[in-house]
Image (cartoon, helix red, strand yellow):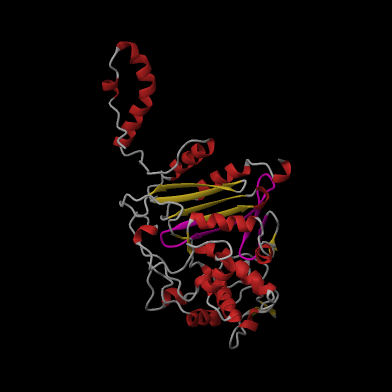
Amino acid sequence: MNIRINAIALIKRPVTMLFSFVYLMPLYFLNSLICAGQVRLVASDNPLHSRLDSLVDRYVQRYFQDKRAVGLSIALVQNGKPHFYNYGETKAGNGQRPDENTIYEIGSTTKSFTGIILAQAVLDKKINLEDDIRKYLKGAYPNLNYKGTPIRIKDLSNHTSRITRIFPNMWERPTYDSLNPLSNYSRTLLYEGLHHMKMDTLPGKIYAYSNMAVALLGTILEDVYRQDYFSLVSKNILKPYQMRDTRINIGSLPSGRIAWPHNEQRKSVPLWDLGEVPAMGALRSTTADLVNYIKANNAEANRAIKLSHQRTFGSDQEGMGLNWFIHSGANGYRILEHGGGTGGSRSSLDCFPQLSAGLVILTNSLANRNDLEKDLVGILAEQPKASEK
């Protein structure tokens, strides 16, 4: 739509001059800003019919002031009802707006799925959260303890294991590709890195985020079930909660279904391939699917989901469950959340069980979504608890 306005041409009679001046000057100035490149026109399906629509649009327009932004899909769940909003493009310059079925990389948001699979393994008596992780590893790992205290399974899921965030052999190998850093990173390399790691303090005491710890947890889960990671996720989460578009392999999909990732210059970059270490961040998903995921978590729809929400470190104000971050909001509401990032995509997922509410933000750029997430959380926090209605 062309919104450049010629105000003078619209003022045809003197009696309408004042009316035209008052109502057209904002458009005139907007036209000037667009011509000066200070305002970006962003395609959107936001109908702007309700207060919620207007608030979301206001916050999203701020987000798009970041020149790195390309595409954005949002789902807000209020009182169990989803609202979907989509902005921008699936690939810079292609003119195709995303929708609730567009597939994005979700990166480390995958880890929350891993936490639920771990909880299921506990319920199936295949794993005990207090077990020394070496019980599940082949070969000797005398280095995986500190002064006699071993790393436990639960330490892998709450980031207190002291396992290095990323092992150096990821980038030191000859096949390392900075645009696809975990491509061809194998189980063998993961275990090799584990052998060379040195413990620096007691596990279970200090939070320090570790991709390698969750990658290792994923291989342990695959081994105890003798199934690959995606099969476990599909059986326990995707199929029961009708998340048909959440997957790892998207090679068979048409290009138009995918939100292609972008770098700092808004140039398209490769999707990440986490082949043999998928548990740390390999899933791709849609806002439509992740709304179902929010609802299942809010309702604690099965025993494994409920167990994954139990705190294993920290406090109720700031703590960790099984790969879930646990917070207490300003109004005392419990928030379960996880975010993610790859080379050119970002994701945020927040669940408010007491409000039957939640949000998903999926982007295909490196634009900073943190303020947008805070603004959207603020909208949800305005709701009364179910017990207060």
Of all residues shown, which one is farthest toward the left? 9
Q: In the figure, 205 relative to 339: above or below? A: below
**In the rendered view of the protein, which quadrant contains the C terminus?**
top right
Q: In the figure, 20 relative to 82: above or below? A: above
Q: Residue at x 70, y 47 (%)?
A: 332
Q: Residue at x 58, y 68 (%)?
A: 114
Of all residues shown, which one is farthest toward the bottom? 139
Q: Position of residue 24 (x, y in %)?
A: 35, 24
Q: Residue at x 35, y 19 (%)?
A: 20
Q: Position of residue 78 (x, y in %)?
A: 59, 45
Q: Which residue is nearer to you in this view: 336 or 207?
A: 336
Residue 333 lies in the magenta stretch: yes
Of all residues shown, which one is farthest toward the right? 387
Confirm whether residue 368 shows in the render. Answer: no
User: Is 295 left or right of 74, judged from the image as shown?
Assistant: right
Q: Quadrant of residue 181?
A: bottom left
Q: Position of residue 55 (x, y in %)?
A: 51, 38
Q: Position of residue 103 (x, y in %)?
A: 43, 59
Q: How many marks?
A: 0
Q: Quadrant of residue 91?
A: bottom left
Q: In the figure, 188 relative to 167: above or below? A: below
Confirm whether residue 20 shows in the render. Answer: yes
User: Is 114 left or right of 11, judged from the image as shown?
Assistant: right
**In the rendered view of the protein, which quadrant contains the N terminus?**
top left
Q: Which residues are magenta?
A: 318-347
Residue 278 lies in the magenta stretch: no
